[in-house]
Image (tube, grey):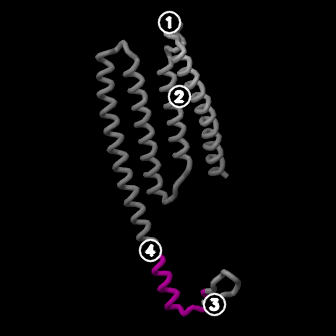
Amino acid sequence: MVESKPGELKTDNLPPVIHAAETKLVHSASRIFLTIEQLIYIVLGAILALTAVLALAGTTGLLWAGFQNWTGTTAVIAVMDRLLFVLMLIEILYTIRASLQSGTLSPEPFLIVGLIACIRRILVISLENSDVAQQAKWSAERAEQFQAAMIELGVLAFLIIVMVAAISLVRRHKLS
């Protein structure tokens, strides 16, 4: 190999046999790494699918317990939390499937998962603190809990705005 400029290798002067061998080696290594990457995606997808099925089965048990004690809100909060968690897992599975099909990793599905996670947390915080403002249940401890929840809701609202803006930018960039 001859250097034409500092840091730049010139392959024009290589004998065709050596150049072909290097090209074949690079293509073989690339195929091996692609196969390993796809196998990891498949295993990861299978584990996520099993996790989603397990979470859904657990949610069914929580729902049944909620029917037995239908006056409480604890089961409703737990069921909503689990169902939104399953939705996040499904969105991640979609991302893996799309990555396998296209061969590229897109940021939009991850932003959507983040958006679902923020909305999930907002719903859970709202449900958990729905009775805090009742005068009979107000205390110093509850006031601290309420203040912490409001700060967390503010941060989550900011994150939602950022993620929606990022999704809009990604979609706009795709169109142009």
Q: CA distance from mark 4 to mark 3?
A: 25 Å
Q: What residue is at 48 percent from the left and 60 percent from the top?
A: 103
Find residue 136 and name its label. Answer: 1
- Regarding mark 1 in the picture, which secondary structure is present there? helix
Instruction: Please determine whether, in this image, residue 70 is positioned above or below residue 92.
Output: above
The residue identified by callout 4 is: 29
Q: Is residue 15 magenta?
A: yes
The residue identified by callout 2 is: 122
Amino acid type, mark 2: Ile
Give the residues in magenta: 11-29
User: Which of pointers 3 and 1 lies earlier in the amino acid sequence?
Assistant: 3
60 left or right, relative to 84: left
93 left or right, relative to 57: right
Classify mark 2: residues with Cα within 10 Å, few (<14), some (14-19) or many (20+).
Answer: some
- Regarding mark 3 in the picture, which secondary structure is present there? strand
Q: CA distance from mark 4 to mark 2?
A: 46 Å
Q: Farthest front residue?
A: 140
User: Looking at the picture, how far across and down is residue 91, in whole percent?
Assistant: 45, 43
In this rendered view, identify the residue nearer to me: 96 or 124: 124
Can you tell which of label 1 and label 4 is closer to the viewer?
1
Amino acid type, mark 3: Val
User: Which of pointers 1 and 4 lies earlier in the amino acid sequence?
Assistant: 4
User: Looking at the picture, how far across and down is residue 33, in whole percent?
Assistant: 43, 68
User: Which of pointers 4 and 3 lies earlier in the amino acid sequence?
Assistant: 3
Classify mark 1: residues with Cα within 10 Å, few (<14), some (14-19) or many (20+).
Answer: few
- Is label 3 in contact with label 1 (beta carbons under 8 Å)? no
In this rendered view, identify the residue nearer to me: 115 or 152: 152
Q: CA distance from mark 1 to mark 4?
A: 69 Å
The residue identified by callout 3 is: 2
